[in-house]
Image: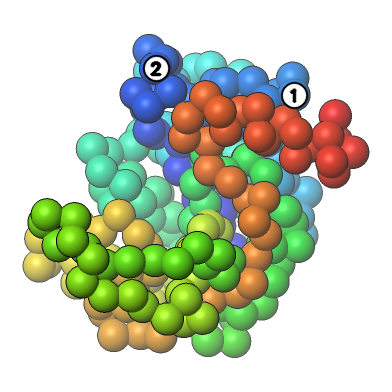
Amino acid sequence: MFNVAVILGAGNGTRMGMDKSKMLLEIGGKTVIERSVEAFLDMPEIDEIIVVCRESDIKVFSELLPDESVSFVIGGDTRQQSVINAVAAIDECDYIIIHDGARPLVTQKSIINTLDKAMMYGAAATGVAVKDTIKFVDGNMKITDTPDRNALVSIQTPQIFSFNLFKKALEKAMKSNADYTDDCRLVEVFGAEVYAVSGDYDNIKITTPDDVAIAENILRIRGKL
């Protein structure tokens, strides 16, 4: 079996108030992209890692990530286009593991559990039960409905798919000019079933400056700092 991990790191630092990639922020002495990629390194289940990044970041990313199993692809204008570019760089594999580079605290346990579920059903994603009450609102912010919290899951990454299934779903999306911000949704629209796997609440996404402090605290609790 041959599996490829795709780490998406082509986003900018706009919400961080930065003029550089937020992947280059340091968390406990290592950059976000280093921590995200290192989670997949040395896993026997992962044969190749493709990092999707901005062209201007390739030099510094390659210096940070010199492992021979890591290669780089230039990202697109949207998440889906970045994924398309990564898929185009893969000749063939059994499963594609798509992960947000901005989630540097993912554990190998979550990766393996999600891969196991994907191998059973063809498509799976890690996620956590929603803790808050969620409301539907209209354009005037008037509450219109309240979904059952027990039926809601906050999906994270990795999201893992049979490569053949994912390619077919991607081709359908491209033909219909659809552009999805979530890889699971792309496969759902194709008509395939996707299964959620119980993950970790501390698999946070680095989005705002406050997230850096939270991430460092999580690493301290894990005994990694």
Image point (42%, 81%), residue name? 148
The type of colouring in the image is rainbow
Q: Which residue is mark 2?
A: 17
The single residue placed furthest to the right in the displayed view is 223
Q: Residues within 10 Å of mark 1 (few under 14, many from 20)?
A: some
Of the pair 33 and 155, the residue shown nearer to us: 155
Q: Amino acid under label 2?
A: Gly
Q: CA distance from mark 2 to mark 1?
A: 20 Å
| Residue 80 picture location, percent across and down | 29, 52
In the displayed structure image, the side of residue 76 where residue 37 appears, left or right: right
Of the pair 58 and 22, the residue shown nearer to us: 22
| Residue 38 picture location, percent across and down | 70, 40
Of the pair 31 and 61, the residue shown nearer to us: 31
| SS state under label 2 | loop
- The disc at residue 107 is none
Mark 2 or mark 1: which is in front? Answer: 2
Of the pair 132 and 9, the residue shown nearer to us: 132
In which quarter of the view is residue 20 placed? Answer: top left
| SS state under label 1 | loop
Mark 2 vs mark 1: which is more N-terminal? 2
| Residue 147 picture location, percent across and down | 36, 78
Viewer can see residue 159:
no
Q: Amino acid under label 1?
A: Gly
| Residue 117 picture location, percent across and down | 61, 80
Image point (19%, 55%), residue name? 141
Q: Which residue is mark 1?
A: 28
Image point (57%, 70%), residue name? 129
The single residue placed furthest to the front in the displayed view is 142
Viewer can see residue 203:
yes
In which quarter of the view is residue 10 placed? Answer: top left
Image point (69%, 71%), residue name? 113
